[in-house]
Image (spheres, rainbow, N blue to C red):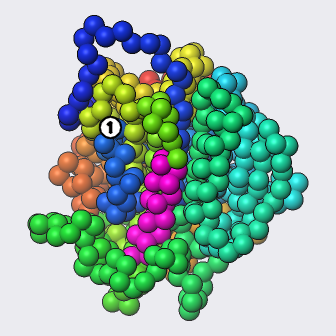
Amino acid sequence: MATAVVLALVVAFPASAGAVVAAPKRPNIIFFLVDDMSADLLSYMDTVGGLADGGTTFTDYYVSDSLCCPSRASMFTGEFPHNTGVRTNQGYDRGGYRAFAKHEGRTYAGSLHQAGYRTGYLGKYINEYPAGPGYRVPAGWDEWHVSAGGGYNEFTYQLTRYIKEKGERSLDPSGGRYLVNELGRRAVGFIERSREYNPGEPFFLQVSSFSPHNRVDFEPGDKEPRFPPARRDRPKDRFPAGEFPHGDCGGPDCDGIDVARLPAFNEDTRDKPSWVRREPLGAKRVQQLREDFRDRIRMVQSVDDMVGRVLSTLTDEEKRNTYVVFASDNGFHLGQHRLVRGKSTAYDHDVRVPLLVKRPATGRQGRVVTNAIAQNVDLFATFLDMAGIDAATRDGRDGRSLLPLIQGQKVAGWRDAALIEHVRPNSGTPGRPDPDADRLKKGNAQPPSYNAVRTAGELYVEYEGDPKPEYYNTVTDPHQQSNEPGNARTATLSKVLDGLTGCGKPGAADCWTAAHLR
């Protein structure tokens, strides 16, 4: 059974009939990737939200694993975690840079560089990447401005500086500059140098902020907040409780800025698997989460400003020939289902994240909204397709190019199901601190290892060690509040999940085929 892909196009302006159109230049590509941004923050980001004008919004974009390192590995390679082998954030536990390093020659950077693109990477890369003295620049990057774990607190970090054409390689202290702002400054410099060193040729720029991830060194009682905004965004009257992103929302279902009004916040969890079930959140905890939510909103103001600063650097000609992509590596929860802080679950607030793509400012300029099921494994093929790299090269991985959907085309035979998989990190083995270990502290939750399938109207999860699955009809229960483990659909979805969890392995179906319901 094929799922219908709905495309809505608003205010389109096609090229004039009979017009002579010159062969287009290969487009520039700018990719903004943020860390731990849940979809509920998007309405507070005017510049990023504005990418929908003349762009495409993916309403059903899912990550392969709601954990930083496995998700980023999928993005870079176009493969699911069970095929990359990157399962956690740390090298001693089947993850981190130790597990990812073997893939560095297989990322989209190498293909784009070989195709003549000038490439630059800024910000957060892969967990445990050694960004200290003697750092190694992965293949395919002409500029490399990367920070390791120090970037999480935004103020005390070191940032590499590698500019191939200048023979420049250094490791720079933060100087107290807010990291998001520094990334914006360096991104502008990259664009200016691309004009100088590679005139007339395209560039690929990826800017990956740590924001709005929490500080990894936070302890209760710290003067600095758990989620550290820029100084200018810290006044208490900046997004006070009760303020809505665009004035009065005009209805009873508005979420506003109070985290306690988000769907599924503090909901009764008696129907949930045992690892979720817990007592209601107390008033003190709820107030802490309110403060966290406001600080996360304040954090993304700098991201929004940074996106605006970078895009304002483009000339009119460049705007007519540049794709701008915005996404998050995973989502985040703050009190939904009584889960305090974290991610890693299969619920939508953790795995269903923003993906907006602004098209070059020529031809069709309306808003496209698509409910096609997209995943981070599709970004590899999408970037290569934007660059005009042949299908044989880009479609040999687990994902497929989103470019036809971005351009507003109807696509027959699109996938019906997204695969979400997660391996519970081994927290008992000594190693470097896991930046996501906050979720393991009292009141937080880390699910068992699981595999899940998400369709247009259902979520089905199988947990290791639990004979009962988790099932939600997401049409009638969009926020996953009423678990139905005995639903008759579970038998069918279990078979679909079996095909997906082994897809791409020798003797198994490829992952694209496995993502179609039969």
- Between residues 507 and 65, which one lies in front from this camera angle? 65
Look at the image and tell me in which quarter the N terminus lies: top left
State which quadrant residue 10 falls in: top left
Question: Does the magenta segment cover residue 277?
Answer: no
State which quadrant residue 349 falls in: bottom left
State which quadrant residue 45 falls in: bottom left
Question: Does the magenta segment cover residue 296?
Answer: yes
Horizontal arrangement in the rendering, residue 427 relative to residue 330 (left or right): right
Which residue is depicted at the point 34% across and 57% down?
A: 46
Which residue is depicted at the point 88% across and 54% down?
A: 134
Q: Tell me where residue 453 appears, x and y as whole percent.
A: 39, 43
- Between residues 15 and 82, which one lies in front from this camera angle? 15
- Magenta region, residue range: 294-312
Q: Amino acid at mark 1?
A: Gly
Q: From the viewer's perspective, is residue 186 above or below residue 109?
A: below
Q: Label 1, on which residue?
A: 54
- Between residues 256 and 5, which one lies in front from this camera angle? 256
Q: Tell me where residue 14 appears, x and y as whole percent.
A: 26, 22
